[in-house]
Amino acid sequence: MPTKIETVEQYLESQPHPVRGRLEELRALIKTAAPDATEVISYGVPGFKLGSPLVGYGAAKEHIGFYVMDPTVIEAFEADLTGYKTSKGSISLPMNGPLPVDLITKIVKARVAANEAKRKKPGA
């Protein structure tokens, strides 16, 4: 029976070397854009929280999933996401080639701003 993944390090160590490197690169970008966020494992994949869920990421068969936790982010960055497969709350990042550093940074910062605004609302 497989061991339940409880930490980000366990998740990363469970991935093949080239995939792990890609995940660690994305993790570092997120940490830089959201230095106050806390790392978590949620739904079996690594993620970050800042008051509430911020973003997550994980390995898929042919891509890296970048989970933005909010469909309005996909809508807001629609023009920038041309060429990427998206769904309601996720972006499929290719396994090869450079990660879109500026785009990832902008998305994470937009999520930080949204979470902070939510926390400052009366009654939140």
Image: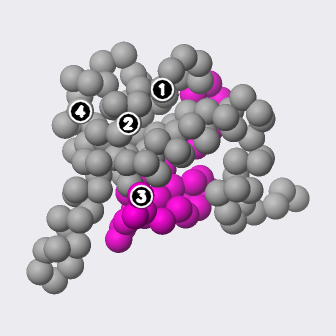
User: Where does label 3 land, which residue?
Assistant: 35
- Of circles 2 and 4, the one toward us is 2
Disc on the earlier residue, 1 or 4: 4
What secondary structure characterizes most of the magenta part? strand
Give coordinates of residue 4: x percent, y percent: 75, 63
Which colouring convention does the figure follow?
A: one colour
Alpha carbon distance from label 2 to label 3:
14 Å
Give coordinates of residue 30: x percent, y percent: 45, 47
User: Where does label 2 land, which residue?
Assistant: 104
Task: Tell me the amino acid under the disc marked 3.
Answer: Pro
Disc on the earlier residue, 4 or 3: 3
- Of circles 4 and 3, the one toward us is 3
Q: Is residue 104 above or below residue 40?
A: above
Q: Is residue 59 left or right of residue 112?
A: right
Alpha carbon distance from label 2 to label 1:
8 Å
Q: Which mark is residue 56?
A: none
Q: Is residue 78 above or below residue 20?
A: above
Disc on the earlier residue, 2 or 4: 4
Task: Tell me the amino acid under the disc marked 1.
Answer: Leu
- Of circles 3 and 1, the one toward us is 3
User: Where does label 1 land, which residue?
Assistant: 99
Element under disc 3: loop
User: Badges 1 and 4: C-beta atoms under 8 Å apart?
Assistant: no
Q: Nearer the viewer, residue 40 or 105?
A: 105
Residue 89 in sight from this viewpoint: no
Q: Residues within 10 Å of mark 4 (few under 14, many from 20)?
A: some
For the point 53% across and 62% down, which residue is it?
Answer: 39
User: Badges 3 and 1: C-beta atoms under 8 Å apart?
Assistant: no
Quadrant showing the C terminus: bottom left
User: Badges 2 and 1: C-beta atoms under 8 Å apart?
Assistant: yes
User: Where does label 4 land, which residue?
Assistant: 77
